Structures are given as C-alpha cells and as structure tokens.
Image (cartoon, coloured by chain):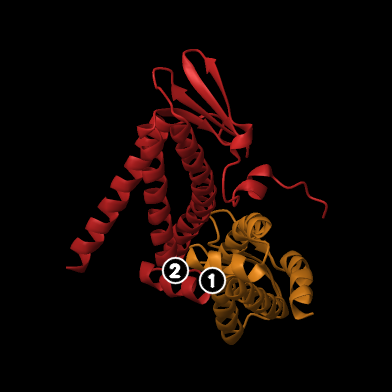
Amino acid sequence: MGKKKNRIEEEVMQDEPQFGLESRTEESGKIVLNFSGNLRVKVAGDRELTGNDVHDIGEQALEFKRAMFCFDCISEFKKVADGCRGRMAEVFLPEENAEPMFEDFGVDLGKLGYAHGDMVQVLFENVSLLIEFGVDSIDIDDPNRPGISLSKLKAELEEMLEEAKEATKSTWVLHR
Amino acid sequence: MDTTRKDVISSEGEQTPEIVEERDKLIQAADALLVQRNFLVQQLSVVSRVRDKLLSVYKKEAETDAVLRSTGFHWNLMNEAYERITDSLYSTLVGLRNLGVKEFSSSLNEYTIVRVEEYIKGLKEAVDASRK
C-alpha cells in the first residue's frame, strides 16, 4: 500500500543501540544523551556518568522502547476486550453466558489479562532501573508519548500493579 | 438473555400465532448475532491494526500470529468466527424479511433500530467476500 513505516516499528527490534550517535549536551542543568534509534534520555545534572554508565543507559533505554511498544499494543487490546466483555455480559445474562463466546471467537481473556499484567511488571522493572541510573525522562520518538516522565510513569504502573493485585485477591476470595 | 429491548417496530403480511412465534425467535437470534458480530468487528479492527504493526517488526506472519496468540488472540479463529457470525446473521435477517419484518429494535445499544432490508444489503458484500 506504500504506507510509510513508523520509525518505532522499524527500530523497536534493533538488537543494540548504536552508540556512534550518542552525544551529551547540558540542558537546564540536565545531561541529555542522544542515542541512535531516536532515543533521547535526560539525566540529572549532578550525575557523573562513566562510559559504561552511558552504555547501560542506552541499552536500558532501548529495552524501554521495546517494552513500551508491546505495552501499548496489549493495552489497546485490553481496552477493547474489556469494553466488549462488559457489553456482552450485559446482553447475555447471566454474565457467565458471555464467557464461552470469547473462546469460541478465538479470544482468550485470561491469557490477555496475564499478558497485560506481565507487561506492566516488565515495564515497571525497566523504569525502576532507568530511575536508578538517574534518568528523569526519555523520548522514544513516539508522537503519542513525547518526553515521558519516568517518575510519573512509575506511579501509574504502580497503581496498575496494585489494581491487578486487588483483582487477584477478590478472585481468590470468590473462589474460596 | 435480556429480552426487554427487542420489539418489532414494523412488520407486514399475515400475523398468525405461528408466524409471530417464529418471528420472535428469529428476532431473538438476530439480536444475539448482532451483539456478537459487533464484538468481533471491534476486536478485529484493533487486532488487525496492531497485527500490521507487529508484522512490520517480525516480518513473518507465522511469528506475528504466535505473538498475538501469546496475548490471547487467535487471528485465524477470530476471522473464521467473523465469517460464521456474518453468514448466520445474514440468513436470519433474510428469514425475518421473508416473514414481513421491516424494522425491529435491538439490544445492541439502547437506541439501535435495525432496518432489515438496509442491513441485509450492507451484509451482502461481507457475506460474498467471505464465501469467495
């Protein structure tokens, strides 16, 4: 169809960040590291970064880009599946009647739930590591997510993990 | 199943008790199929968009579909289900048309009125495509 490919899609599976393009600049008291793959990372200005640190940050930033890509895909699936599930459950009363239909339609809601939970966990660990490296924000060249603040994202992910825990707890109580 | 919102709005021809009973059964079936098809259309639209993205990364359809399956979506089964439901809905609506039903309200959402002839025309293309 001659569709122009998104750079994120092309580069998300790249094995290694290319450090040849790495550069450092000081910006409002922060160190800005530019990596190939259109990755831009801002680190707290008081950090003293060795070459190894920069390499690790680059690798972790690339991991983050991959994880964010998968997370966005699964989140989109989940949003629609949850919406449809709610609507189907309303119509095909009692609610249990709606469940087998999903299976029949090639959709495994349980698997989707687990995949989403796993992805939140992976992203959370990734973000925590980047924060440990002193990274404040990251730009993965996604117009939908300009300059991602890691502390804000971590708080959102924490909330999702809590919600997932609560959901598991209530299922457990129900099944007891 | 919730039966409160499905009513015949407009029908013509003979209305014997047998015909009314058959008509109500078909409306019930059509309504269920409408809801199911709506679900599949929504899911397929999102999964198809994401599948295209994944395909540009993984390059191979088999690998892409394996990734989709790991997140709970069986691409082939979804498409088969879509064809099956579309086909059934088409036949059911044709059955309703043959009984003289012009319009009925559906529980698809609160204000959905299904104009039978119009819907059959819209589905015809999808049914033909799936039968090829």
Q: Quadrant of the N terminus of chain A?
A: bottom right
Looking at the image, the residue that sits furthest to the right is: A2
Q: Chain of mark 1?
A: B
Residue nearer the viewer, B131 or A159: A159
Instruction: Name the residue beneath numbered marker 2.
Output: A92
**In the picture, which quadrant includes the C terminus of chain A?**
bottom left
Counting from the top left corner in percent of width and height, residue A8 is at 63, 44
Q: Which chain is red?
A: A
**Residue type at numbered disc 2:** Phe
Q: Nearer the viewer, residue A148 or B116?
A: A148
The residue shown at (54%, 52%) is A73
- B103 relative to B50, above or below: below
Expressed as whole percent of the image width and height from the top left, the position of residue A144 reads 59, 36
Q: Is there any visible trace of residue B37 in the rendered image? A: no
Residue at the image point whose x is 55% and y is 82% from the top: B21
**Residue at x-position 25% and y-position 62%:** A171
